[in-house]
């Protein structure tokens, strides 16, 4: 997957983005409390999302998707981040780390079988990488795929797998046995959700992001055929993981900017209307200073996310920039949410007030798809290695 090309013209994309923005702000935003209290996305919102093509907006048009590239994806992510993150989570793996493995590395037969159903929302794809003891670093995988005739037998346990409870397809990362003489030995397999031996645990109870569903998945002697091996190449797995995660990190940066923008807007609205001693709290300079810090972070994060997306699409930087964008924007969103609660005072700590939910929702963003600590290692280590290489 060397380059990404924009398949959707700018004027068409503007219309698409406007429709998504309208959907988020007029249909989803008024039902955020319902989503939080029921811990689910209402069926009618799911149906409308599917009708709009949101389950496959990054899937190429030839497979039934909208064909948006990463530059456009970031703009969409900023809109989706403005409301409950469970909405984006519902179709995020289809468009992101699971779907992109197929788009970038699948055979034509694998794409034809799965991508149209993924794009329509008929199939929900889950990215099964994280394990107990192997999170942000795929090199620590313990799940195995043992050669058996012309097929494979997969054994292992994955945790925190998004959409596992609804998944029709698991994109499973496993270490091949016997181990190859060279390479990482990590391969990627397409495992149907109803395959014998696939066991999905109960939905995880989380701090926030109500309505999004994660669970543990166990693969016990799951037998798959040769057509399950992504790209028909055992060495494609590690490259697929790294590429998909890097792309996803830029999307995550855009999503975080959307969250921070909502936190800022809620802060400004509250400061302009709430009073202390008859004076709007927004007239107090210390409140203005908190709002100023939020605004500065949002502007910087938006610019960084967009720049990282352009560099990824052009091929200029697919490693350092994605990590820098993810690191800064998710940390910034956490600070913006914290400031939003502070601007609201005691009101901001009350359940069903938007900033209370935002505060809990954004905390996860610094953990999934690579923790902030992992991003710092990628950035710092990458720059040092590049300097050593240049010097030698």
Image: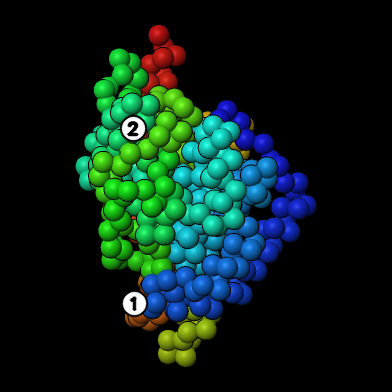
Mark 1 or 2, nearer chain start: 2
Q: Secondary structure at mark 2?
A: strand
Q: Is the N terminus in the top left, top right, bottom left or bottom right quadrant?
A: top right
Residue identified by numbered label 1: 349
Q: Are marks 1 and 2 in contact (CB under 8 Å)?
A: no
Query: Residue at 33% of width from left, 26% of height from top?
Result: 149
Dividing the picture into quadrants, the one containing residue 165 is bottom left
Residue ranking furthest to the left: 133
Residue at image location 62% in from the left, 35% down from the top: 4
Disc 2 crowd rating (10 Å Cα; few below 14, some 14-19, many 20+) is many
Quadrant of the rendering where the C terminus is positioned: top left
Residue at image location 57% in from the left, 68% down from the top: 47
- Residue 382 relative to residue 250: left or right: left
Task: For marks 1 and 2, give the CA distance.
Answer: 51 Å
What SS does tag 1 mark? helix
**x and y, in percent, of residue 18 in the image:** 69, 62
Q: Is residue 315 visible?
A: no
Q: Is residue 151 visible?
A: yes
Percent from the top left, x then y, of residue 116? Answer: 60, 48
From this view, report whether residue 258 is shown above or below residue 357. above
- Give above or below for 277 relative to 190: below
The single residue placed furthest to the top in the displayed view is 392
Q: In the figure, is residue 308 to the left or right of 276?
A: right
Residue indicated by mark 2: 152
Q: Is residue 79 left or right of residue 130?
A: right
Task: Point out the frontmost of discs 1 and 2.
Answer: 2
């Amino acid at each position: 997957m060397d380059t990404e090309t924009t398949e959707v013209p700018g004027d068409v994309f503007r219309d698409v983005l406007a429709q998504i923005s309208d959907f988020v702000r007029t249909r989803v935003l008024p039902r955020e409390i319902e989503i939080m209290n029921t811990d689910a996305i209402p069926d009618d919102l799911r149906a409308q999302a599917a009708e709009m093509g949101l389950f496959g907006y990054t899937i190429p048009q030839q497979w039934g998707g909208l064909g948006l590239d990463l530059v456009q994806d970031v703009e969409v992510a900023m809109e989706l981040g403005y409301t409950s993150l469970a909405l984006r989570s519902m179709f995020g793996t289809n468009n992101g780390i699971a779907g992109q493995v197929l788009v970038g590395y699948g055979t034509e037969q694998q794409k034809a079988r799965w991508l149209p159903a993924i794009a329509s929302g008929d199939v929900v794809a889950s990215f099964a990488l994280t394990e107990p003891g192997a999170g942000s670093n795929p090199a620590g995988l313990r799940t195995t795929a043992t050669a058996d005739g012309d097929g494979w037998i997969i054994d292992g346990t994955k945790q925190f797998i998004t959409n596992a409870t609804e998944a029709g397809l698991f994109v499973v990362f496993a270490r091949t046995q016997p181990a190859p003489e060279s390479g990482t030995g990590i391969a990627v397999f397409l495992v149907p959700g109803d395959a014998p031996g696939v066991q999905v645990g109960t939905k995880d109870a989380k701090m926030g992001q109500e309505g999004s569903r994660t669970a543990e998945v166990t693969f016990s002697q799951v037998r798959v055929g040769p057509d399950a091996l992504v790209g028909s190449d055992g060495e494609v797995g590690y490259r697929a993981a790294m590429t998909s995660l890097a792309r996803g990190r830029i999307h995550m940066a855009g999503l975080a900017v959307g969250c921070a923008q909502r936190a800022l807007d809620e802060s400004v609205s509250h400061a302009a209307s709430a009073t202390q001693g008859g004076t709007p709290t927004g007239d107090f300079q210390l409140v203005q200073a908190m709002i100023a810090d939020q605004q500065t972070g949002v502007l910087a994060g938006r610019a960084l996310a967009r720049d990282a997306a352009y560099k990824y699409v052009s091929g200029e930087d697919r490693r350092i920039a994605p990590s820098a964008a993810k690191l800064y924007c998710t940390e910034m969103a956490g600070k913006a949410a914290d400031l939003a609660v502070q601007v609201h005072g005691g009101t901001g700590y009350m359940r069903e007030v938007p900033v209370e939910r935002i505060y809990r929702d954004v905390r996860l963003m610094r953990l999934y798809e690579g923790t902030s600590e992992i991003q710092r290692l990628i950035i710092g280590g990458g720059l040092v290695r590049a300097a050593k290489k240049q010097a030698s």
